[in-house]
Amino acid sequence: MIKIYHNPRCSKSRQGVKYLEDKGLEFEVIQYLKDEFTADELKEVIQKLNIKPIELVRTKEAIWKENYKDLELSDDQIIQALVENPRLIERPIVVNKDKAVVARPTEDIEKVL
């Protein structure tokens, strides 16, 4: 089943949900700010995205700038920062089987359908 990691306060995330609804697809919405990622879950999603952990970080967020920006962090440390501060995670993330995409722009969802 398709999953969308969603933040209802984010317009891009809401657009992703609407896109899937408009396609008539069945999908599961995971509000990752409430149902937080574990480090292992996040590693799995990053692997499906085929990116480095730093590529999933919203580096313009104040939390990142104030706490992490000038540090040399390993991939595991970046993942731990994302687990502890889920607002730093780019969104929405759409996962379908072994593929995933950060749906920015929304049409990128097509890449995993």
Image: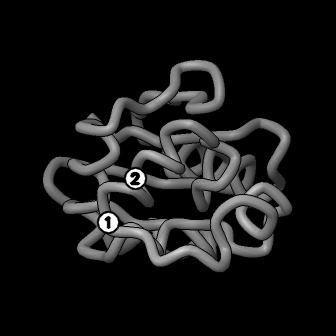
Quarter the C terminus occupies: bottom left
In the displayed image of the protein, which residue is found farthest to the front? 71
Nearest to the observer: residue 51 or residue 10: 51
Q: Check disc 1 and report its element: helix, strand or loop.
A: helix
Write down the residue under mark 1.
75
List x then y, in percent, for residue 68.
Answer: 64, 65
Tag of residue 46: none
Amino acid type at image mark 1 = Asp
- Quadrant in the rendering for residue 50: bottom left
Name the residue located 67 percent from the left edge and 47 percent from the top edge: 18
**Residues at discs 1 and 2 in contact (Cβ within 8 Å):** yes
Question: Alpha-carbon distance for marks 1 and 2?
Answer: 6 Å
List x then y, in percent, for residue 77.
Answer: 39, 56
The answer, for residue 96, to whether it is visible in the render is no
Amino acid type at image mark 2 = Ile
Q: Tell me if mark 2 has few (under 14), some (14-19) or many (20+) residues whose alpha carbon lies within 10 angstroms of its own.
A: many
List x then y, in percent, for residue 3.
Answer: 39, 38
Name the residue located 14 percent from the left edge and 55 percent from the top edge: 98
Residue 56 sits above or below residue 34 on the image: below
Q: Check disc 2 and report its element: helix, strand or loop.
A: helix
Nearest to the observer: residue 81 or residue 53: 81
List x then y, in percent, for residue 2.
Answer: 33, 41
Name the residue located 29 percent from the left edge and 51 percent from the top edge: 45
Name the residue located 20 percent from the left edge and 62 percent from the top edge: 47
Quarter the N terminus occupies: top left
Answer left or right for 100 relative to 80: left
Write down the residue under mark 2.
79
